[in-house]
Image (cartoon, rainbow, N blue to C red):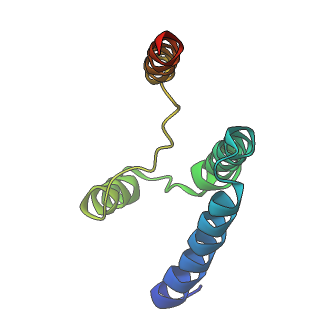
Amino acid sequence: MASTHNTEQELQSLVNLVEALAQSYHPDSDRLLALLRTLEQLHRQIRTELFEPSLPNTRHDLYAFLRDVEESGGWPYIERGKLQTLLERYREAWEHHSESEKD
């Protein structure tokens, strides 16, 4: 089993790679959206195919695992963009566009 330090280094390398990819895609919203969809799909795949089957199968072990999860930062979650946020940005852009046409 990999040491905690090695795991942290591996994960930091992954974070660096994803951040560099996201920066290279900026400001192309289509490419950034594709990246977010890929990350969400990967999250779902890891969760259902690997993480869930690896969960402890006794009450005592599951309780200890859940306690450790809560103490070390909680459950991972990838939030979907909110339609309301997109609509607000659209409204702001529309208002800005309308005002610039008046000038």
Q: In the picture, which quadrant includes the N terminus? A: bottom right
Q: Relative to 54, does residue 45 appear above or below in the rendering?
A: above
For residue 40, which quarter of the picture? top right
Q: Is residue 56 left or right of residue 40?
A: left
Q: Is residue 31 left or right of residue 78?
A: right
Name the residue rendered at 74%, 42% in the picture: 34
Counting every numbered tag in the picture gives 0
Give the x, y percent position of residue 6.
Answer: 54, 89
Name the residue rendered at 50%, 52% in the picture: 57
| Nearest to the observer: residue 17 or residue 71 | 17
The outermost residue toward the left is 71
Q: Relative to 21, does residue 42 appear above or below in the rendering?
A: above
Give the x, y percent position of residue 58.
Answer: 44, 53
Q: Relative to 56, does residue 40 appear above or below in the rendering?
A: above
Give the x, y percent position of residue 26.
Answer: 64, 53
Q: Relative to 86, does residue 77 appear above or below in the rendering?
A: below
Name the residue rendered at 47%, 89% in the picture: 5
Give the x, y percent position of residue 62.
Answer: 39, 54
